[in-house]
């Protein structure tokens, strides 16, 4: 990934409040704000321009992450139309400072965002993928560079919409892939900046242990993974159909083992060294 110098400006001095982000030698600019400051966001002159926007929040029933990705020639007018959507709690707008983004450009960027966010699968998207727009080869190249900068800025603004769950590009724990085994089930995973990921193809036990009754969150987490189709029953085990990220190694191990677990000793290298030892050596 290309290196970047990012300028983050906090008009109120609060990182959770309205903020802007720019990258050196990039024509774009991003503005983020919580829904509680929507009026302040709409008042900014940048929203008179064409651009793309991302609304994020949680499904009011399931609590799972949801997002809406859109584009408009005048961002302000389009955002006003989304006041009726209940789920979203934060908005990110991206425009071009030199006003060179056309309707075709922002449709292209919208389609790229939808495609990548769908592939990554962290969020359920509120709309179907669009057809994008046909651009000349030189314009497509320019928009791919523009899109790469959006991808860099989103995490800085608090959005993991385009961060792959497994994060193969991230530096992994020394010792490589770790294993958690219980009664024939075998899961593979590694630490991530946000916690711990269990990799697609891993298996978990079908039956919960008695200890799970003392920790309701384990049962709730397993049920949610089953409901979401991430855990499916196969050959006497639960199979992970996709990479799944957890808040900690212990939460991941608890799901795999069907009961309370200490992830620091349940996750091991292929040579048997436990995660706790790897942490102590780091």
Image: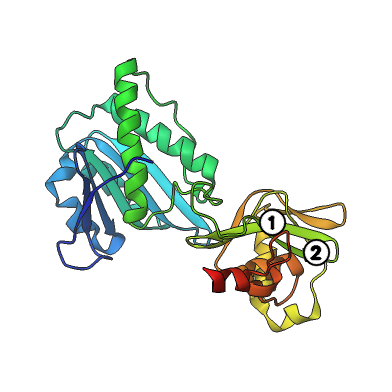
Camera-nearest residue between 130 and 149: 149
Camera-nearest residue between 225 and 66: 225
Camera-nearest residue between 56 and 252: 252
Task: Say which label, 2 or 1, has the lower sequence index.
Answer: 1
* Location of the N terminus (image quadrant): top left
The residue lying at 73 percent from left, 54 percent from top is 202
Task: Decide: is 163 above or below 272.
Answer: above
The spot of residue 6 in percent (x, y) is: 24, 50
Q: Mark 1 points at which residue?
A: 188
Q: Name the residue under label 2.
A: 205
Looking at the image, the residue that sits furthest to the left is 45
The residue lying at 85 percent from left, 66 percent from top is 183
The spot of residue 222 in percent (x, y) is: 69, 65
For the residues labelled 2 and 1, say whether their Cβ atoms are less than 8 Å apart: no
**Residue 277 visible, this orientation:** yes
Left or right: residue 13 versus residue 157 is: left
Task: Decide: is 131 above or below 160.
Answer: above
The spot of residue 249 in percent (x, y) is: 61, 68
């Amino acid at each position: 990934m290309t290196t970047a110098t990012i300028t983050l400006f906090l008009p109120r001095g609060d990182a959770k409040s309205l903020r802007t982000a720019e990258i050196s030698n990039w024509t774009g600019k991003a503005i983020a704000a919580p829904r509680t400051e929507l009026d302040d966001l709409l008042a900014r002159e940048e929203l008179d321009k064409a651009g793309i926007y991302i609304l994020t929040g949680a499904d009011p029933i399931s609590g799972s992450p949801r997002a809406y990705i859109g584009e408009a020639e005048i961002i302000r007018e389009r955002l006003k139309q989304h006041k009726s959507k209940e789920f979203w709690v934060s908005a990110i707008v991206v425009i071009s400072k030199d006003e060179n983004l056309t309707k075709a450009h922002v449709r292209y960027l919208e389609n790229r965002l939808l495609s990548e966010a769908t592939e990554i699968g962290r969020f359920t998207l509120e709309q179907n993928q669009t057809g994008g727009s046909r651009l000349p080869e030189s314009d497509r190249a320019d928009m791919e560079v523009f899109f790469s900068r959006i991808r860099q800025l989103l995490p800085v603004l608090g959005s993991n919409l385009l961060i792959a769950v497994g994060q193969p590009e991230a530096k992994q724990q020394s010792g490589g892939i770790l294993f958690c085994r219980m009664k024939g089930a075998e899961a593979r995973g590694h630490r991530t900046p946000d916690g711990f990921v269990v990799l697609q193809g891993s298996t978990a036990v079908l039956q919960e242990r008695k200890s799970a009754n003392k920790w309701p969150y384990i049962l709730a987490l397993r049920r949610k993974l089953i409901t979401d189709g991430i855990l499916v029953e196969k050959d006497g085990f639960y199979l992970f159909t996709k990479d799944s990220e957890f808040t900690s190694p212990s939460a991941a191990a608890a799901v795999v083992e069907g009961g309370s677990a200490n992830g620091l000793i349940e996750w091991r290298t292929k040579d048997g060294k436990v995660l706790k030892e790897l942490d102590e050596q780091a």
